[in-house]
Image: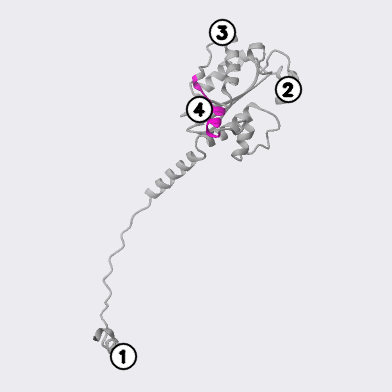
Amino acid sequence: MREIVLDTETTGLNPRTGDRLVEIGCVELDNHIPTGNTYHQYVNPERDMPDEAFAVHGLSEAFLAKHPIFSEVADAFLEFIGDSDLVIHNASFDMGFINGELDRLGRPTVDFSRAIDTVQIARSKYPGAQASLDALCRRFEIDLSARTKHGALLDAELLADVYLELVGGRQPGFELAAERKASAANTIETRTAPARPARPHAATESERAAHDEFMQQITDPIWRD
């Protein structure tokens, strides 16, 4: 089962009012296990960078101007995600920007039914608790020390760990370990020990005499009633 954990950074909050995509990060999962295969791309938004957005991710207009525009990376991005389900924290936000960019190019958009929203999973599993990525990392004791600012690939990697916890902790790893243990057990040879003759248990004459002498010392034994 292939899934793609996805995160984006943008110039703002609303693609319908001119905000654009500036970074995409993806982490591939196979049966809920990261494969090490990732996709990461900075995108030139062809516009300025508002101070509020820069404070979040630290990606300046000058830095992004050196990178390709979305039309130049769209094929590589779509090839990477393929037809896999997309694990996204607050899916409506990221899907809105991805589909906004695709729609701007006149290309088919990504069906929202492919999105697995970890915010919804967290709110269902922990009603009333904070469901931000930071809060979930703290809940599951996932190291946040590298997250001084938002970054699409780093956040996708953190979200992959959070998603694994939300869908059952490290159970996939336990299952693999159990399979390996069972496989190893099946390779152990069964050996039949040779039968040994029964050891004699009959008392010797000297043992019988010693027993009779001891029994004579017991006064009024109950077996003589």
**Mark 1 or mark 4: whose residue is earlier in sequence:** 4
Residue 59 location, quadrant = top right
Image point 71% across, 32% down: which residue? 148
Residue 190 location, quadrant = bottom left
Q: Amino acid at mark 1?
A: Thr
Q: Amino acid at mark 3?
A: Gly
- CA distance separating discs 1 and 3: 112 Å
Give the extent of the magenta segment. Answer: 113-126
Task: Indicate yes or no whether the magenta region holds residue 63.
Answer: no
**Mark 2 or mark 1: whose residue is earlier in sequence:** 2
Image point 32% across, 91% down: which residue? 217
Answer few, some or many: residues within 10 Å of disc 3's Cα (few below 14, many 20 plus, some between 14 and 19): few
Please state the horizontal and vertical placement of residue 37, each as a whole percent of the image. Answer: 55, 30
Q: Is residue 217 left or right of residue 98?
A: left
Q: Which mark is residue 219?
A: 1
Instruction: Evaluate if marks 1 and 3 touch, with contact meaning CB atoms under 8 Å apart.
Output: no
Is 181 rendered above or below residue 198? above
**Mark 1 or mark 3: whose residue is earlier in sequence:** 3
Answer few, some or many: residues within 10 Å of disc 2's Cα (few below 14, many 20 plus, some between 14 and 19): some
Label 4 secondary element: strand
List the residue tagged with mark 3.
Answer: 106
Q: Which mark is residue 54?
A: 2
Q: Nearer the viewer, mark 2 or mark 4?
A: 2
- CA distance separating discs 3 and 4: 26 Å
**Mark 2 or mark 4: whose residue is earlier in sequence:** 4
Q: Amino acid at mark 2?
A: Phe
List the residue tagged with mark 4.
Answer: 3
Please state the horizontal and vertical placement of residue 39, each as a whole percent of the image. Answer: 58, 25
